[in-house]
Amino acid sequence: MNPFDSAQLIGMMRRYLFCSICTGVSVVLLIAIWILWQFTHSLETVYRERDQEGQAMLTTLASGPVIRQELARVKDVVQQIEDNLVIESKLEENYSYFYKIQNETKADLIYLRRLNSDPSGDGYDYKLIPFSLQLSGTYEQLAAYLLEIETGPKLALIKSFSFRRRELGSPYLTLNIELRLLGKR
């Protein structure tokens, strides 16, 4: 008997009808089981991904108040910086900043001049506004003035400074400073 002869195979299936039906149903069920296993495997993968996203979301929700506090603090600091920016056109307000420091430190402000600004691109919201100062006083007064510029509310970049004694043996010094203040365009 040739196993590939279709006439003999059909005849055998008719003779053993119950076995043939059971074999067909078994093959169909095996295919269905394999498809369901593949589907279940893909659902498990999706479930694991969603579980990880859920855990990340719970962590984010738990740290939400801290993030909101940090965001509020950053907004306050940015507002404080914006409020302390120098406006180039307000010359007397800019000069009064240096004279106010003079009154606090008791150093004598001999020379104060705003220098020409470096040309910068139009795409920037801020610019550096240069100033040149010359002060006289004791070392403690001048150091306090310099410290007040560095730690004051205006954002300053000290380009250079130099101390020199006014006269030999005198306790008074002269301080020359070139600095740039951050300002609005």
Image: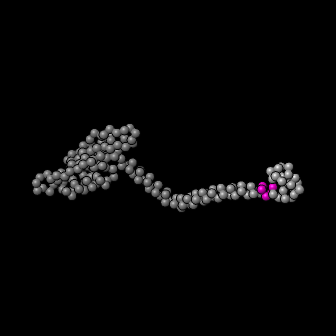
Residue 2 seen in the current view: yes
5 with respect to 108 (left or right) = right
Please tell me which residue is depicted at 15% across the width and 53% down the height of the picture. 165
Count how many numbered circles sit on residues in the image.
Answer: 0
Quadrant for the C terminus in the image: top left
Quadrant for the N terminus in the image: bottom right
Query: Observer-nearest residue: 67 or 80?
Result: 67
How is the structure coloured here? one colour
Place of residue 135 in the rendered image (x, y in percent of width and height, measured from the top left): 20, 50
Determine the residue located farthest toward the front in the rendered image.
Answer: 1
Place of residue 4 in the rendered image (x, y in percent of width and height, measured from the top left): 80, 50
Please tell me which residue is depicted at 83% across the width and 49% down the height of the picture. 6
Query: Observer-nearest residue: 157 or 75?
Result: 157
153 with respect to 141 (left or right) = right
135 up-or-down from 69: above or below: above
Please tell me which residue is depicted at 69% across the width and 55% down the height of the picture. 39
The image quarter containing residue 138 is bottom left
Place of residue 45 in the rendered image (x, y in percent of width and height, measured from the top left): 63, 57
Secondary structure predominantly adopted by residues drawn in magenta: helix
107 up-or-down from 184: above or below: below
Task: Report the span colored magenta.
Answer: 24-28
The image quarter containing residue 32 is bottom right
Question: Residue 27 colored magenta?
Answer: yes
Please tell me which residue is depicted at 28% across the width and 54% down the height of the picture. 148
149 with respect to 66 (left or right) = left
